[in-house]
Image (cartoon, grey):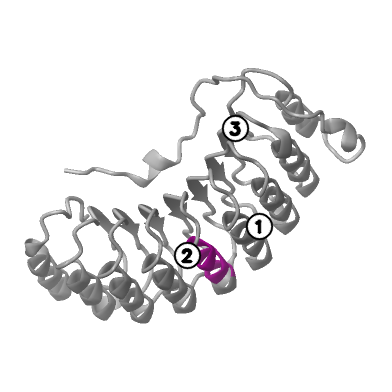
Amino acid sequence: YSKLQFSSLTPTKPPPAGTQLKTSSVSEAYPTKLSKEENKIIEKLRPSDTTILDVGSKNISAEGAKAIAEALRTNETLTALYMQEKNISDAGSKAMAEALKINQTLTYLGISSNNISAEGAKAIAEALKINRTLTALFMRKNNISDAGAKAIAEALKTNRTVTTLYMQEKNISDAGSKAMAEALKINQTLTYLGISSNNISAEGAKAIAEALKINRTLTALFMRKNNISDAGAKAIAEALKTNRTVTTLYMQENNISDAEAKAIAEALKTNHRLTHLP
């Protein structure tokens, strides 16, 4: 049985560094704007054996994020960048987006909890229409709202590389959920979608359910802590009677009654692919 856990996709420590990292010296471009900690991070982007950069507990400003983004424009080996809880804001997000339009090696980008709004998300979305190497994007705990979710969803209609997308706690409602559902009807590469802890009701869940009747690549769907209620849960269960790719589904804490939960479990007996339903 699949025992996929959310935490398994968000490692707290980077794996050992590997191949050489080549970047231009960018700290000189920001001689007075960067803090001592930010300059140390930029130093790590000089030629070395670094392939994964975990900013860790270091404070990063929007200017620091811009400097890192500038380095990524010429970087040829960095594959993963962890910048959670750094308050890079929309300015840093936009700079990162511009780098993604050029960078051809980064596969993992973690920018959760960074005070990014819809404007920053829209910039990232535009980059996803061009970038062909990024496979995992973590944008949890920002405030991209429906406008940002719609932009990301639109990008996923043409993007063919992103397989993992987590947008929990983003203030996304049914409008954003419906946009994501439309993307799922077209996208053929996304396998993990996390939209837990948003403001999605039964209407948004029904839209996702309709997409699941068509989509043949999504394997894990995280929808915990929304408000899809019995009607939304029933729609998802109905879709999974015919869907043969989803193996992991999280729908806890969604105002689903015990009676409906039992009915859903009964309905899903015909689905032999679903192996993890907490």
Q: Is residue 151 part of the magenta span, yes or no?
A: yes
The answer to which of marks 1 and 2 sits earlier in the sequence is 1
Amino acid on which the number 2 mark rests in the picture: Lys
Q: Which residue is mark 2?
A: 157
Q: Is residue 39 part of the magenta span, yes or no?
A: no
Along the horizontal axis of the image, is 200 left or right of 145?
left
Q: Quadrant location of residue 214?
A: bottom left
Along the horizontal axis of the image, is 153 left or right of 277?
right
Mark linked to residue 218? none
Tell me the SS state at disc 2.
Answer: loop
Q: Position of residue 61 (x, y in %)?
A: 76, 45
Mark linked to residue 115? 1
Residue depicted at x 59% and y 73%: 147
Q: Is residue 235 visible?
A: yes
Q: Give the class, few, some or many, for how many residues have Cα within 10 Å of label 3's Cα (few <14, many ≥20).
A: some
User: Observer-nearest residue: 262 or 267?
Assistant: 267
